[in-house]
Image: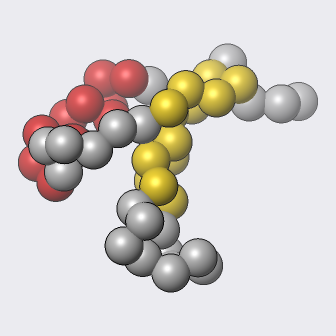
Amino acid sequence: MTVWVYVDTSKEVGDKDHLKVFADEDAAHRWFQENDSEGVAFEYEVLE
């Protein structure tokens, strides 16, 4: 299983909006279209 992670570098570490974690690429894509058209999320494996 993987998630997609976006880091908003304009926010302070610990700020609730500093990280966005998406369940899949489509969810990330939809969020970017509405909120940050130039943003990028990276895929990471979820560890068990």
Asked which quadrant contains residue 11, the reply is bottom left
Q: Position of residue 7 (x, y in %)?
A: 47, 55
Nearest to the observer: residue 28 or residue 8: 8
Q: Position of residue 1 (x, y in %)?
A: 67, 18
- Note whether residue 17 is visible: no
Q: Position of residue 13 (x, y in %)?
A: 58, 76
What sort of colour scheme is used for the picture? secondary structure
Residue at the image position 50 percent from the left and 32 percent from the top: 42
Residue 13, relative to residue 30: is it above or below?
A: below
Residue at the image position 83 percent from the left and 30 percent from the top: 47
Residue at the image position 36 percent from the left and 73 percent from the top: 10
Residue 31, relative to residue 44: is it above or below?
A: below
In the rendered image, the residue lying farthest to the top is: 1
Question: Where does the C terminus fall, quadrant-wise?
Answer: top right
Q: Position of residue 32 (x, y in %)?
A: 21, 42
In this rendering, position of residue 30 left or right of residue 15 = left
